[in-house]
Image (tube, rainbow, N blue to C red):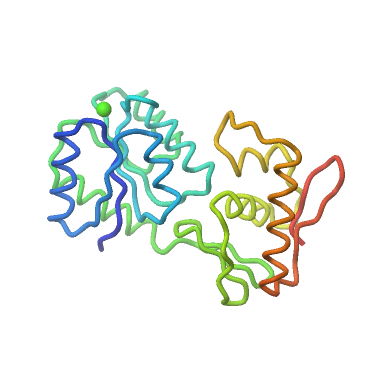
Amino acid sequence: MTGRVLVVEDDHPLRSVLLRGLREEGFDPVPAADGAAALRLATSPFDAVVLDVGLPDADGRDVCQALRAAGFTAPVIFLTAHHHLTDRLAGFSAGGDDYLAKPFHLTELAARLRAALRRAGPPPPAAAGGLVLDPTRFTCTASGDPVGLTPTEFRLLAALLAAAGSLVSRRELRRAGWPEGAQVSDNTLDQYLSRLRRKLRAAGSDRTISTSRGIGHGFR
Ligand code: CA
């Protein structure tokens, strides 16, 4: 089993070795030199991520947490120079699936990637009211027809669908749709929600985004 793998490593020689080796092992690796590049690239589909913990602009575990918060479900394997148990545990609690200490053999990384991909299996698409969201490909279909969504619209809709009919607070929606620390005005959030409603209506969806003033929004 092979797949498209995001390789996040700031050490240039090591990154080159990883890219070449993974290609030889039949994977389709895509490089990122820091956390910001990884988060940018991860808005497109990946089957797995190899993520260095010591990045120049962020801790790899924080990058992983941000990916998970954005609805990214593909397996993440951390690379680290640390061997301590606490580091390992922190990696798992950040949403990582496996941990590999440097130096390592590329064949071991490839084997762990294959095992992680096998365990992950095909991603479970979220479906409701004829809508299907695929969180690894950032695609949405309504009764089989594609609905063109921006990554932010996708994340907002994914958060609403994940609540399965319960209300999602506006604060949670901001957290789901935008990176941490982003300034999102009420007006901006409303604009995104009305654009989503329009797109869902145009796609023939019989369900839409509801508003409970002062509480939040639902999908019903
Ligand atoms: Ca590093």
> Relative to 115, is 107 on the left or the right?
left
The extreme right residue here reads 213
What residue is at 85 percent from the left and 48 percent from the top?
Answer: 212
Q: Nearer the viewer, residue 188 or 215?
A: 188
The extreme bottom residue here reads 144
> Relative to 99, is 136 on the left or the right?
right
Q: Nearer the viewer, residue 100 or 63?
A: 63
Q: Quadrant of ligand 1?
A: top left
Residue 210 percent across, percent down from the top left: 80, 56
Q: Is residue 132 above or below residue 176?
A: below
What residue is at 45 percent from the left and 61 percent from the top?
Answer: 123
Residue 41 percent across, percent down from the top left: 39, 46
Residue 155 percent across, percent down from the top left: 58, 50
What residue is at 74 percent from the left and 55 percent from the top?
Answer: 194
User: Which quarter shows the N terminus?
Assistant: bottom left
Quarter location, residue 215 = top right
What residue is at 43 percent from the left and 41 percent from the top?
Answer: 39
> Relative to 33, is 219 on the left or the right?
right
User: Which quarter shows the C terminus?
Assistant: bottom right
Q: Is residue 191 above or below residue 56?
A: below
> Relative to 76, is 115 on the left or the right?
left
Residue 162 percent across, percent down from the top left: 64, 54
User: How many numbered discs?
Assistant: 0
